[in-house]
Each structure stands twice: as C-alpha cells, then as structure tokens.
Image: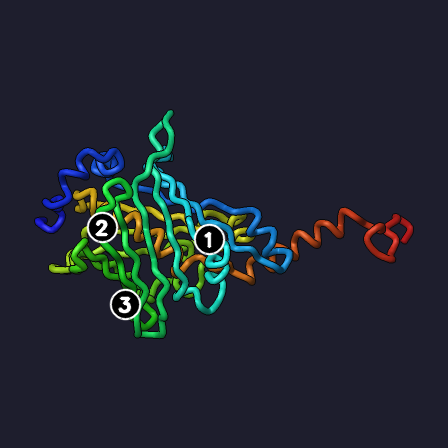
Amino acid sequence: MALFAPLAPQQQSMEFTPGFALLQQVEELQVKERVSWLQEVTTFLGAEIETRNRYSVQDRIGNQLFYAIERTDCCRRQLQRTCLHECASWEVDVLHTPPGQYMQSFLSMRRPMQCVCCCLCRPTAEVFDDLTKQKIGSFRDPWRCCNYNFQLRDAYDSAVLEVHGGCCQPAVWCSLPCGPCSELHFDVLDARTGHRVATIRKVVPGIMTYFFASDVDNYHIHYEQVQDPAWKALLLSFTIYMDFLFFNDPNPKAEEDALGVVEAVAAEEMGCFGGNNCCCCCC
C-alpha cells in the first residue's frame, strides 16, 4: 500500500538513525510496563504516590530493544490520579538500548496541558525524532461514546491511521487476568481505505500483578502491512500514550482484596500475639 511507503522528506535522516533501522526489521513488538513497588506500597498505605511510568519494549522472544521512561515532574504526575488526568501534560522519552552499549536517544513524546471537556479540545500528543528534532506525527483522541477510537496523524497533521477498539469486548467492562476478559484488541486501519493494516493487543500480565499492581498492563503490536519505520515508531508511541490515557488507573477492588489477603495471613502468623484470644490447643 502506497500509504506505508517511507516518507520522502524524512527518509534521509531516518535511514541513518539506529532506532529506525532496527524498527524497519521487526514485525512485532511487546510493550511491558514496569511495576513501581514504591507506588504500589504507598497505595496499600492509603496515600498513593504516582511515580514515573516505565516501559520495556521487546521483540517477540523477549530481547529488549527500547526503553521508555516518563520525564514528567512530580507535581504534574500526581494530577494523573485526579479528575484532571485528561488535562494533565506529560513527557516520555523512548531510548534505543543496543546490547552491550549505552542507551541512545530515539523518540520523545510531548503532551501539552489542555482544558478537555467531553467532546471539546480533545487530548493530543506529538512524537519527535529525538536526534533530528523532526516531528514524526501526532495522535488525537476524538470523542466517541463507549469506544476506544483514535486518529494517528503525520507530521503535517493529516490523518493516516485510525485505531478502533470496540465496546463489545468483555475486557472493556470487566478486566480480569484470565479468559476473554484478559485481552483487549485494537484494529489499526488505513485512514483512506479503511483496510486493517496492523493490530494492537492489550494483555493483563498475570494474577499476581493484577492483585498487587492492577494498573500494569502489557501490549503486543503486530505491524502486519506497516513497513515504514516512521509509522512503526508512531504506533509504538501511541501504545504508550493509550496506556497513559485509559489504562493507568489501579483497580481499587482488586488491591483491596489483595490487602485483605495480606492482613489475614499476617494475623494468622501472629496467632495469639495479635489479639486477645489465646491460640493454644486447649482454647
């Protein structure tokens, strides 16, 4: 498809960028959010501190290719847990991690502060090549009732891709670590023809992560017909953006259940020393 041939104005600079050269070779990526135990411990204590989000980007067999880290300051990070999370600004850097070498600058995402209200002034974020400082593209969350629909745009703000996640999937309404509720599927469509060209799959990591760090998710990106490394980089950045916007809130019920289990185990281990009742065999 012509849409997915490399962009002529940016191709010369991207050919010699190691990160884009690597993306041109991969057909799928795994994006694994890293657990922040400081954040989870403070959540259990009832005074959650929002820490920097971190993501390990790996190939299909688990080799780390990139590492994404949030650069937002502490005050703005705390806004992500409030009713103003759609308005809050944030910055994320994606670093190339060649084996045996230091991390190298690759991409930067910038989401400015916006006054978002329902269908007005919807959230947008821009992606830049961190070496050349050229804009690669942007993504926008248009107003859609009960659906996860997004627009991915090129450097000139023309829509090139659309991401659709229907509201009829069980995981939309009940996210669980097993069965059909553990996966959420998104189709990536050509904005001009409507044909599917790639897919993104959100996966709950496992039962222990679900109970103790319920805001942590993994993603699988299958590029399929997308060949241009610029669009691959845009889809990678979008996946992180989507996690920030919609899937970065903990599940209070799951974490309350986990806390209850921890308290029950602690009480059982303490025995008669934890209360007024004696646990001797004659009592």
Task: Tell me if residue 262 comes above or below residue 64 in the rendering.
Answer: below
As measured in the structure, the alpha-carbon distance from the residue carrying label 2 to the one carrying label 3 is 21 Å
Quadrant of the drawing holding the C terminus: bottom right
243 horizontally vs 196: left or right = right
Is residue 60 in sight in this rendering?
no
> Which residue occupies 48% across, 55% down?
215
Q: Residues within 10 Å of mark 2 (few under 14, many from 20)?
A: some
> Which residue occupies 52% across, 51% down?
213
* Residue named by callout 1: 73
Q: Residue flagged by tag 3: what amino acid is it?
A: Pro
Which residue is situated farthest in the right direction here?
282
Q: Residue 142 got which mark?
A: 3
241 horizontally vs 193: left or right = right
CB of mark 2 within 8 Å of CB of mark 3?
no
Q: Residues within 10 Å of mark 3 (few under 14, many from 20)?
A: some
Q: Residue 135 got which mark?
A: 2
Element carrying mark 1:
loop
Element carrying mark 2:
strand
> Which residue occupies 44% across, 68% down?
84
| Displayed quadrant of residue 69 | top left
Which residue is situated farthest in the left direction here?
2
Q: Residues within 10 Å of mark 1 (few under 14, many from 20)?
A: few
Q: Nearer the viewer, residue 11 or 241?
A: 11
Task: Tell me if residue 22 comes above or below residue 265 in the rendering.
Answer: above
Element carrying mark 3:
loop
Q: Nearer the viewer, residue 125 or 187?
A: 125
Place of residue 64 in the rendered image (x, y in percent of width and height, measured from the top left): 37, 35
Q: Residue flagged by tag 1: what amino acid is it?
A: Asp
